[in-house]
Structures are given as C-alpha cells and as structure tokens.
Image: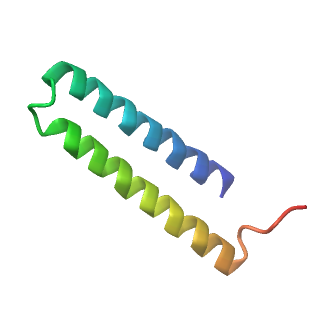
Amino acid sequence: MRIVVIVFLVLIVGSLASALLFLLRDQGKGRRTARALAIRVGLSIALFVLLMAGFATGLITKRL
C-alpha cells in the first residue's frame, strides 16, 4: 500500500510540473495546462479515496 501511495504522489507532482511547463510554453493560451491540472485534481481525489478505503478495510493502520 505504501508503494501505491508513493506512486500516486509522484504522479501528482509530475502532473503539476507538466502543467507549469505547459503554462510557460503556451503562455496560458492552450488547453494543455488546464488538462494537466484536471488530471492532478483527479489523482488527488483518487488518492484520498484510496486512503479512506485503506483505513476502512484495515490495510492502513494507525501507528503510534
């Protein structure tokens, strides 16, 4: 589960970096920036749902 969360975080940061790159190249006139940011939001929501499901099923436990 830890590896899946790390992969999601890397994908989220990669999507954010690509959105910045598209913004600088297109100067805000293209749709690629908005698409990359929408993908980032979708990945963030998917990660949140995955974490909540992990807590609910017991795959993720609270460590003290």
Coloring applied to the structure: rainbow
27 vs 1, left or right, is: left
Quarter of the image with the N terminus in it: bottom right
Residue located at (37% from left, 38% from top): 15
- 55 relative to 20, above or below: below
| Residue at image point 12% right, 40% down | 31
| Left or right, residue 18 beside residue 4 | left
Please state if 11 lies on the left or on the right of 39 as rendered.
right
| Rendered location of residue 6, percent (x, y) | 60, 45
Q: Residue at x 52, y 63 (%)?
A: 48
Furthest residue in direction front, as rendered: 28
Furthest toward the top, the residue is 25
Outermost residue, right direction? 64
Check the image and report above or below for 49 versus 30: below
x and y percentages locating residue 46 in the rendered image:
44, 62
Q: Where is residue 36 in the image (x, y as percent from the top left)?
A: 27, 42
